[in-house]
Amino acid sequence: MRQLVLDLEESLIRQVANAGMGRSDVLKFWFGESDEVTPAFIREAAAESLTRGETFYAHNLGLPELREAIASYCTALRCEGAPPVGADRIAVTSGGVNALMLAVQALVSAGDHVVAVTPVWPNLTAQPAIMGGRVQCVSLRPAGGQWRLDMDELLAAITPATRLLIVNSPNNPTGWTLTRAEQEALLVHCRRTGTWILADEVYERLYYGSSPNGCAPSFLDIALPEDRLMVAHSFSKSFLMTGWRLGWLVLPASATIHFGKLVEFNTSCAPVFIQRAGVVALARTDEVTPQVVAHLKNCRDTLVPLLQGVPGVQVAPAPGGMYAFFRLAGQGDSFETAKRLVVEAGLGLAPGNAFTSDPSPELQGWLRWCFASQDLGRLRQGVDRLTDWLGRARAPGL
């Protein structure tokens, strides 16, 4: 086995979750998914496809009707003046993770320089490392209650030798979201250096700021169709379809045919019955996504004030995503803290050091709480458990 694979670190999130698997007394907020089941009409579309016997291979790039539906969906979300997204720019993938990995396979060779904005979901830095890329991380920093990007630092890191910039916005775990001005600066700079941009925009619809289309700013609003840009999306978050493993990439039309070859050598295609469910999900998106976003905002606005009331907790409302990323004063190694919380408090959270290897003091002691819960009482109960645990942990003699 390749040494790169042997050297890969197992997900710290998964390690914490494994410690609590099978325990009914643990409140589980460690994974990035809602506990709400996929809407019935989406499930029924898949079942009807199976009943029709659609159990065979499809086109590598996806069913034509799904690619058309995705293109129409992406175009409808764009700001005024943005170029439409054509179906010839769409590749259907077996989940957002698969979309991101395929993009990295297409772009990164051994020794290539890759820049990533962190903290970030660990797959986004592991994937180019698997391909032998040299990953340089540029960290967001907490400032004034929010996460901020030092644009000068990021632009300085991206040189003509940089093959790929990876940026996730809205960001997992912090909720930080690129501004339009920041996107424009990055696009102009990467055109100048010849650097590809891989934009993970799977949380685009889970945005709580003001915008004319109800979405976070997207690179697709400002980029030209043939720019060196790949944008990854997923049905998982906005359509409550995490277990379905269905996603897509928007890429330059000239790259699409070559991308189909990569799909062939990885998964051949996404299952037809799952793609049928995707078509129906997009056709009836107004029955799903707005309600998901409204509920998640309610979850955020329930959890964050409760956490702000806990002594020693540093947290601010995230402008996007489904997470509260908060810091516990006096707690150094967040991985050890997260393991203790599972065992001692019955509370399952993701450790902050799963998302960054930056040793800076201001990036230590953070935890991620996925607030996508149907039952707001679970969020309140979780905060009660955290408060009780902190009280016991700080008690004299403990």
Image (spheres, rainbow, N blue to C red):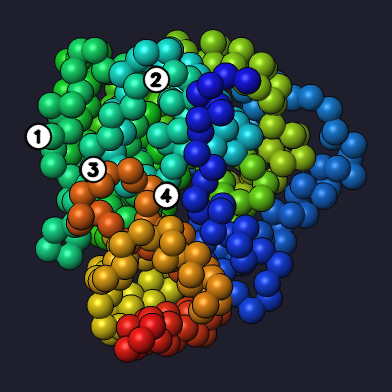
Q: Secondary structure at mark 2?
A: loop
Task: Tell me the quarter of the image containing the C terminus.
Answer: bottom left
Q: Residue furthest left?
A: 152
Q: Which mark is residue 354?
A: 4
At a point 48% along the width and 20% down the height, the residue shown is 131
Q: Amino acid at mark 4?
A: Ala
Determine if residue 47 is in view.
yes
Question: Which circle marks residue 303 in the picture?
Answer: none
Looking at the image, is mark 2 or mark 4 earlier in the sequence? 2
From mark 1 to mark 3, how far is it between C-alphas? 12 Å
User: Is 207 situated left or right of 248 in this image?
Assistant: left
Say which element carries label 4.
helix
Q: Is residue 331 left or right of residue 369?
A: left
Of callouts 2 and 3, the N-terminal one: 2
Spatial separation of the CA atoms under disc 2 and disc 3: 18 Å
Residue 152 is marked as 1
Q: Toward the viewer: 272 or 168? A: 168
Q: Which tag, 2 or 1, sits closer to the chain's start?
A: 2
Residue drawn at 62 percent across, 66 percent down: 20
Q: Amino acid at mark 1?
A: Asp
SS for callout 1: helix
Residue to which mark 3 is pinned: 139
Give the alpha-carbon distance from disc 2 to disc 4, as whole Å: 20 Å
Location of mark 2 (residue)? 133
Disc nearer the start of the sequence (4/1): 1
Residue 211 visible in image: no
